[in-house]
């Protein structure tokens, strides 16, 4: 195979990028698929329909509640930042126009009945955030008592969801809660650059 | 020692949620005179009309972004020394140097909490009473 053909074959090879909790990935490559597994977590898939650029985030607001105070609590700040980061990254790689964004949201399951319904709080958060910012949800698959695997093509915007069995779901939720517990809201990395 | 309640702050962010969070945190720190602008252009309009003691601006915004806003302000004698804090995401961290060159007074990485915000503000305008 010639070098050119070999290079082309490498570029066109399907690439599946796993989006872990706390991650945010954006791509304009046709051969890329973003993949994530969600229990109570939320994943938003944002795509610029004109520029064919898209991305996925994956986050959990562990201490959300509906009170006014918690609207701006540590979890909500983290969630708003996770959404802003994804939207800005897509805008930056795309047309920069918010009206070109198509948004799909997934997750927020209630897998473990012994735990508070963290998933429901996460669904409330993401609905409110998108409504406040003036975005419409193109499609969603949220809630229910199961975990999900979500595959998203950032250029076509196609999203596929596979519902997972309850045992897998229990394991996923345990990991999500443990990860969220370790997260510190902005015990900032910014302190490693003291400028002034 | 400046009193938070007497300081006139302008928050510039295209996301309502982020403006709400910033306003809430400033409220926790005792700030009362808070104005919001939803873009760099909106901010320039407000700065033309009023004098602000402190600007806290997002970086990535449609039309005029935070860096351009900062550069415009630094060019005009009336606003060249206006205290300016850039609120930015982790992914923009390497761009902080560009903001320093443009004359930013300090920066804050999102998501931030009240303690970090206080520290950054005090580094710019002095310890709050």
Image (tube, coloured by chain):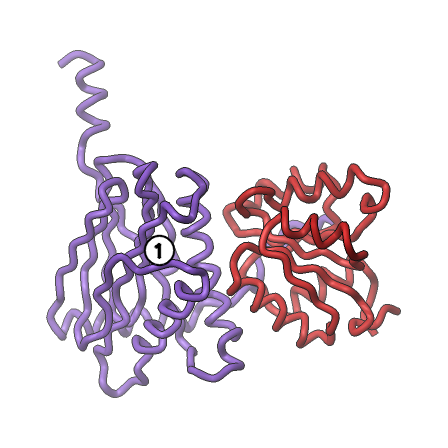
Q: Is residue A113 above or below residue A170?
A: below
Could you say which is closer to the camera, residue A52 or residue B100? Answer: A52
Residue B118, image x, y percentages: 71, 67
Q: At 19% from the left edge and 48% from the top edge, which residue is drawn?
A: A158
Q: Residue at point 78% right, 71% down? A: B4
Chain B painted colour = red
Q: Secondary structure at mark 1?
A: strand
In the image, A119 versus A142, the foreground residue is A142
Say which quarter of the image contains residue A43. bottom left
Q: Which residue is under mark 1?
A: A57
The image position of residue A21, as x and y in percent, is 34, 60
Q: Residue A92 vs residue B121: left or right?
A: left
Residue situated furthest left in the rendering: A165
Position in image of residue A124 (x %, y %): 36, 74
- Label 1 crowding class (10 Å Cα cut-off): few <14, some 14-19, many 20+? many
| Residue sitting at x 38%, y 52% | A24
Query: Which shade of the palette goes to chain A?
Result: purple
Q: Residue visible at 24% across and 78% down?
A: A110
In which quadrant will I find the N terminus of chain B? Answer: bottom right
For disc 1, the chain is A
Q: Furthest-right residue in view? A: B1
Left or right: residue A13 versus residue B61 is left
Left or right, residue A98 beside residue B43: left
* Along the line of sight, the residue nearer the viewer: B41 or B118: B41
Give the percent coordinates (x, y) of residue A175: 29, 69
């Amino acid at each position: 195979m010639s070098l050119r053909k070999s290079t082309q074959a490498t570029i066109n090879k399907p690439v599946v990028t796993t989006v872990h909790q706390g991650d945010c990935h954006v791509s304009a490559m046709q051969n890329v698929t973003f993949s994530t597994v969600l229990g109570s977590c939320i994943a938003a898939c944002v795509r610029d329909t004109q520029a064919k650029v898209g991305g996925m985030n994956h986050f959990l607001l562990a201490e959300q509640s509906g009170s006014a105070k918690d609207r701006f609590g540590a979890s909500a700040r983290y969630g708003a930042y996770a959404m802003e980061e994804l939207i800005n990254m897509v805008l930056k790689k795309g047309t920069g126009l918010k009206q070109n964004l198509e948004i799909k949201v997934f997750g927020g399951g209630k897998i473990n009945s012994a735990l508070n319904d963290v998933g429901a709080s996460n669904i409330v958060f993401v609905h409110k955030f998108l409504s406040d910012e003036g975005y419409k949800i193109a499609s969603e698959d949220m809630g229910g008592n199961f975990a999900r695997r979500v595959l998203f093509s950032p250029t076509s915007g196609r999203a596929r969801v596979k519902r997972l069995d309850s045992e897998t779901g229990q394991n996923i939720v345990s990991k999500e809660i443990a990860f969220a517990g370790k997260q510190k809201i902005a015990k900032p990395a910014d302190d490693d650059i003291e400028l002034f | 020692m400046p009193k938070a309640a007497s300081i006139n702050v302008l928050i510039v962010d295209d996301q309502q949620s982020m403006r709400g969070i910033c306003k809430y945190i400033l409220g926790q720190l005792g700030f009362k005179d808070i104005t919001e602008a939803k873009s760099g252009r909106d901010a320039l309009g407000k700065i033309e009309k009023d004098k602000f003691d402190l600007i806290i601006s997002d970086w990535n915004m449609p039309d005029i972004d935070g860096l351009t806003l900062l550069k415009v302000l630094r060019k005009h004698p009336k606003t060249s020394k206006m205290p300016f804090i850039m609120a930015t995401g982790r992914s923009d961290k390497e761009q902080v140097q560009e903001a320093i060159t443009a004359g930013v007074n300090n920066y804050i990485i999102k998501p931030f909490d009240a303690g970090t915000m206080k520290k950054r503000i005090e580094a710019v305008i002095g310890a709050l009473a």
